[in-house]
Image (cartoon, rainbow, N blue to C red):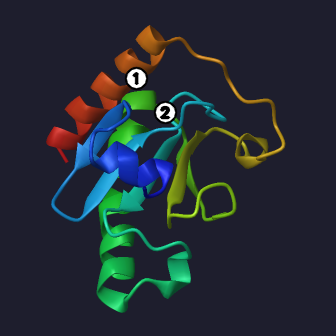
Amino acid sequence: MGSIFTRIIHRQIPAHIVAEDENYLAFLDILPLARGHTLVIPKKEIDYIFDLDDETLSGLHIFSKKVARAIKKATDCKRVGVAVLGMEVPHAHIHLVPMNSMSDMNFSNTKLKLSSEELADIATKIRDSFQHI
């Protein structure tokens, strides 16, 4: 059946996709720490990020860099934080979180509850920025 992320890759469940190429996909976290909190995944389903082959791992980080630049431009944050937790879904992924202070990256913080319309608006802004990176 595959992970929930694999189902997103195959468009079996909806997601607010902000960037994609043949190997990687970036989409908004539905319970974000901040507006623009994005998950970046390889399309290859591998549970643990450090089990990825070197080419996929480096490609994931290079793709994430482009997505982070788009997030920064779209959200006007000071920085985009990077976190690899990997416990919540058995599919390697990187969290990119817009931040204006260190506390913005605290995963114990209360998650935002954004409407589908708000998420769609944020996704559009990031997609538009990504096209100009």
Of all residues, the one furthest to the front in this rendering is 1
> Residue 52, located in which quarter of the rendered image?
bottom left
Query: Mark 2 belongs to which amino acid?
Result: Gly
Could you tell me residue 30's position as x and y percent? 55, 30
Q: Nearer the viewer, residue 52 or 60?
A: 52
State the residue at coordinates (36%, 16%). Answer: 121
Residue 11 percent location from the top left of the image: 28, 39
Q: Circle 1 sits on which residue?
A: 122
Quick check: 97 above or below 64?
Answer: above
Residue 93, numbered circle: none
Badge 2 density bin: few <14, some 14–19, many ≥20, Cα 10 Å: many
| Residue 36 marker | 2
Could you say where residue 132 lies in the image, as x and y percent from the top left?
Answer: 15, 41
Q: Residue at x 81, y 36 (%)?
A: 109
Quarter where residue 114 is shown? top right
Q: Nearer the viewer, residue 76 or 113?
A: 113
Q: Is residue 89 above or below residue 48?
A: above
Q: Dot 2 lies on which element?
A: loop
Is residue 69 in view?
Answer: no
Name the residue type under label 1: Ile
Which residue is depicted at the point 53% across and 84% down? 50
Question: Considering depth in this image, is 98 or 59 the residue closer to the camera?
Answer: 59
Can residue 52 be seen in the rendering of this structure? yes
Circle 1: is it few (<14), some (14-19), or many (20+) Cα within 10 Å?
many
Asked if residue 121 is positioned above or below residue 58 in the image, the reply reads above
Give the residue displayed 20% in from the left and 48% down from the top.
133
